[in-house]
Image (cartoon, grey):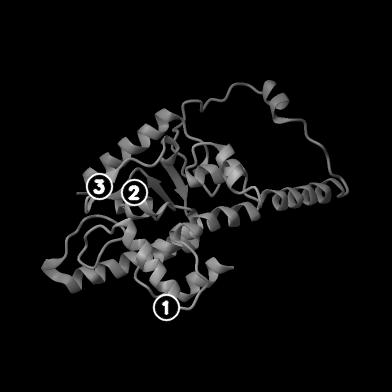
Amino acid sequence: MQTAEFLHAVGDHRLYAAYHLIALRGLRRGEAAGLRWCDVDLDEGVVVITQQLQQYDGHLIACPPKTARSARVIALDRTTVAALRDHKVRQRHERTQAGKRYRDSGYVFTCLNGDPMAPDRLTRTFTKLIAEHGLPPIRLHDLRHGAATLALAAGVELKVVQEMLGHSSIVLTADTYTSVLPEVAHKAAGKTATTSSKPGASFREPNSRAAARQPPRSDAGASALPTGGYGTASKALTPAARSDIREDAELHCSRRH
């Protein structure tokens, strides 16, 4: 509820899309600050997390993601795609207004002159907006927690939420959101009971048994980079696939500049 109230209150702010992305898709603040337009495909509705920005000795440094699993592909819902499209239009207007003073850094969330934005500034602006609108005091990181809580409450599988957040293990995700899991389990039990009680309902054998009788798939060499919907774009990636994500993104970015 606090997430929706905050997003509604700051809808006209120039950094609205950043907070929307963190609140709905669970990015860390460093990942949001480090996001480049070449990491974003609005037509396909995905972003690729390949780096984060951190501040050391007063300088912004592009670093690898926090953990190996933090290099990931995240699916975007329609509202997030719309927010990013609006942000892109606003950014073009800011570039025009700044003229020669504008630096085209290629980052999604920038200062008014086009320079990358420090994660700390995202936090300070967030705190200021909370105070200005008289909202209950919450941390920017709470928006990330809210994304996971909303996803779990909506029935999204724990493994998918782990991949969306870039957690190093599913145990960490389960331990962090243990208060939400009982509610999710009760909903799942209710849905199962409802489905099984319908006339004509049948019980299918486990996938492992059914798969044992299936011929080998012909697409075993398919690409490890998922580009589908909410669940498929957050599925587990092998270490090799995560390395490929970073290499492909860097190649894609270099071609755009």
The Cα–Cα distance between marks 1 and 2, rounded to whole angstroms, is 32 Å
Residue 10: in sight, yes or no?
no
Residue ID at (33%, 38%): 246
Nearer the camera: disc 1 or disc 2: 1
Write down the quadrant of residue 112 in the picture: bottom left
Q: Position of residue 195 (x, y in %)?
A: 81, 48
Left or right: residue 119 compared with residue 130: left
Q: Position of residue 89 (x, y in %)?
A: 31, 68
Image mark for residue 181 = none
Residue with the mark numbered 2: 39
Q: Nearer the viewer, residue 65 or 84?
A: 65
Residue ID at (57%, 25%): 217
The Cα–Cα distance between marks 1 and 3, rounded to whole angstroms, is 31 Å
Q: Badge 3, how many Cα within 10 Å: few under 14, some, many 20+?
A: some
Write down the quadrant of residue 17 in the picture: bottom left
Q: Which of marks 1 and 3 is nearer the N terminus?
A: 3
Identify the amino acid type marked 3: Ile
Residue with the mark numbered 1: 132
Image mark for residue 61 = 3
Residue 208: in sight, yes or no?
yes
The Cα–Cα distance between marks 3 and 2, rounded to whole angstroms, is 17 Å
Name the element at disc 2: helix
Identify the amino acid type marked 2: Asp
- Note whether 228 is above or below 245 in the view shown: below
